[in-house]
Amino acid sequence: MTSNKSAIHEQGNGYFDEETSADVVNARMGDAADPRLKQILAVLTKHLHAAIKEIEPTQDEWFAAIKFLTDTGHMCNSWRQEFILLSDVLGVTMLVDSINHRRPSGATPNTILGPFYVEGSPHYRNGENICLDGKGEPALVRGRVVDVQGRPVAGATVEVWQTNNDGFYDVQQKGIQPENNLRGTFSSEVDGSYWFQTVKPRYYPIPYDGPVGKMLQAVDRHPNRAAHLHFIVSAPGYERVITHIFTPDCPYLAEDAVFGVKRDLVATFDKVDDQHLATEYGMPSPFL
Ligand code: MBD
Ligand code: FE
């Protein structure tokens, strides 16, 4: 390659050149385009071309990549979002979540919302049981909603959801599990406290019967999520916290399939009597 090739490119003759390929593509965008969109597409094009140059795929390999993305799209419907799963297992969902939820120390960290949240779950009084199928190891969850200064937040909305003891969310087993099994909405008391009965969460695999599952298998990765209980805590005037707590003894804690585990979200589950485990988690703390 001679140096005058890039000189020609800078003049914008628009012809393809392997060395400057990304620039040639990006130069096509016009002034009328939205600047943020231009920036995004330019960065993606730059890194995609760099990846292709590093990989030097065969034609067959590139076609396999296209087929993988096509299959991923075909797998999507109203209840199955295979592209979100792809983003999850590549760590991109967590990265975007982290970038958008940088918080002062002491605040509860965010983690992924996941695909199984349902808006408007049944309201319960503190102390009630969200487990409607009677399976699993009973557990009591209690905590306090406080602000970053540690002041109680009364009347905060605490939404929780988790899988049943067979490792499925209610919405994955309509007609098999009771409706709204293991999901509910609570309200914090004057001192910020909330508590409810449930069962200890257990680990379970993300849906792996599609292209993302095949990809995980091909690269020798398991599909298991560390056992978790989802939370959304919200209160007027405070930033909403979307998070989980994790059980401390889960074998997948350090190898969550979607990279959702953060150190501060690992709770303790202690036996308090023959029947009950209890977890006390100094969270969630929405903040101004
Ligand atoms: C889940 O249960 C979940 O919480 C996430 C983030 C992704 C897939 C399944
Ligand atoms: Fe989940």
Image (cartoon, rainbow, N blue to C red):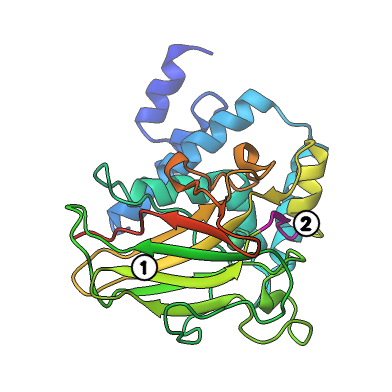
Q: Residue at x 77, y 52 (%)?
A: 213
The disc, 1 or 2, on the residue closer to the chain's N-terminal end is: 2
The location of residue 270, given as percent across then percent down, is 55, 51
Q: Residue furthest front?
A: 273
> Which of these two is toward me, 231 or 270?
270
Q: Residue at x 41, y 67 (%)?
A: 232
Is residue 99 highlighted in magenta? no
Magenta stretch: helix, strand or loop mostly? loop
- SS at mark 2 in the image: loop
Q: Residue at x 45, y 44 (%)?
A: 95
Q: Residue at x 58, y 70 (%)?
A: 198
Vertical position of residue 149 compared to residue 130: above or below: above
The location of residue 202, given as percent across then percent down, is 68, 57
Magenta-colored span: 202-208
Question: What amino acid is labelled 1 in the image?
Answer: Val
Q: Residue 233 — which label?
A: 1
Question: What is the quadrant of residue 283 in the picture?
Answer: bottom left
The location of residue 253, given as percent across then percent down, is 61, 42
- Left/right placement of residue 107 relative to residue 183 reads left
Q: CA distance from mark 1 to mark 2?
A: 30 Å
Q: Residue 44 — which label?
A: none
Residue at the disc numbered 2: 208
Question: What amino acid is labelled 2 in the image?
Answer: Tyr
- Left/right placement of residue 161 relative to residue 105 reads right
